[in-house]
Amino acid sequence: MNLLPFALLPGLTAAICAAHDAIQDGVEFLRAHMPAQDRGTVTQERLVREVRLALAARSQFPWAAQVPWELYENNVLPYAVVNEPRDEWREQFHHLFAPLVSPCKTGREAALAIASLIQKTLNVRYSTERRVPHQGAKESLQSGKVSCTGQSILLICALRSVGIPARMAGVLTWNHVRGNHNWVEAWCDGEWKMLEYNEKDFNTPWVMSAISMLDPRKPENAIYATSWKKEPSGAFFPMIWEARYDEKRHALAFPPESRTVPAVNITDRYMKLANEWVAAQPEYVPGSRLMLDIREERKNGARRLPLHVVLKSEEGKVLAEGITPGPSDDMRKFLEVLLPDNISRGMLEFKLPDGTVRHEPVAHTEAPVQILNFFVSAP
């Protein structure tokens, strides 16, 4: 029988006690801030398993050990993201993604490796045929179909399983089209980075462009990120799938049961990031961005018309031109033209299906982007 040297016992005992204290602290944190609906269903044993696995990842990966404990506790330990089913995903995801990131030296490398390979690894793709937006990991893996929210949940689970702090971020509605969008933030290089499912780099171009069009003065354009602990502001993450339309206010309303996920308002940071991203594009020219859409009004609705539009200066100089989106184009797609800062006014010119030419004046405004929806009568 081999006995440990007596001199090593105090250090070993201290390590065991420290590990026990860390588990206890993590469990207490999860329980202190868990949603009320979880208190009768998520057991103490489940919480211990979650914390043990999260601490094991912290010991295994160098980037995890470098994360401040308070941040790790709030964005790696949690067993859920929003109000999805409380599946036990951590061990399964660790087995899938730990080998994938084993060659990585930094959290940045690991986060990008997971994001770029997660669709191939899980065989789950975006689909409008998913059952609900906020599917749990188990249902998403079984069906192979998810929304942007479902994609974000899977990516967050994958990142957390290897000790990378991750949270969901999202906007209630875009400024230029209807509809919300959720994505992921991963903690890398000492800051939060915008990351999406099945992307090879941070700051997805179409999302950056869409964010730059938001009007931060509008509450519905605010961007929030999830938090496990309750924030001093009392803000909640806007889970649009739980919202109800208020006929009197002509706006979405969030009942109390939909306000269960704490959040932080990150609008200012994203507006700065998106505007810097736009300004860094090779074709960037300072000016007012005009997003154009032309629709033909019919009895059964309105149909988008692909018409050639020309933007001219008051002197008749052509400044920009292009084709507006047609019926089969994505609803996020608009014809974007620019009225340069050094030209005060302009004129949009387009020919209608009946051959007549229509003119619409444009000028600079304080809005980040002007959404111009023109309607024409069907013949």
Image (tube, rainbow, N blue to C red):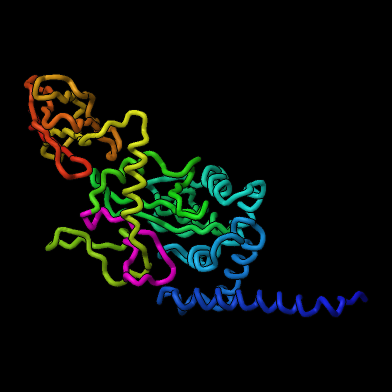
| Visible residue check, residue 138 | no
Tell me the residue at 60%/50% (across/down): 106
At 27% from the left and 51% from the top, the residue drawn is 173
Query: Magenta segment, principal secondary structure?
Result: loop
**Can you say whether 42 is above or below 152 in the image?**
below
Residue 69 in view in this figure: yes
- Point out residue 146 in the picture as x, y percentages from the top left corner: 43, 50
Residue 311 to residue 275: above or below: above
At 63% across and 48% down in the image, what residue appears? 105
On-image quarter of the N terminus: bottom right
Which residue shows up at 66% across the image and 74% down it?
Answer: 19
User: Residue 190 or 78: which is nearer the viewer?
Assistant: 190
- Of residues 121 and 156, the one nearer the viewer is 156
Whether the magenta-drawn stretch holds residue 273 is answered as no
In the depicted view, which residue is nearer to us: 377 or 232? 232
Q: Which residues are magenta?
A: 217-238
Across and down, in percent, residue 343 comes to 15, 29
Number of marks in the image?
0
Q: Is residue 21 above or below residue 76?
A: below
Q: Position of residue 41 (x, y in %)?
A: 48, 76
* For residue 290, above or below residue 321: below
Q: Is residue 345 left or right of residue 147?
A: left
Question: Is 357 displayed left or right of 110 in the figure?
Answer: left
Say which quadrant the C terminus sits in: top left
Q: Farthest residue in the right direction?
A: 1
Q: Position of residue 305 (x, y in %)?
A: 19, 29
Q: Quadrant of residue 247?
A: bottom left
- Asked whether 369 or 197 is in front, the reply is 369
User: Is residue 232 one of those drawn in magenta?
Assistant: yes
180 left or right of 374? right
Q: Give the residue at the far front of this rendering.
A: 342
The image quadrant of residue 14 is bottom right
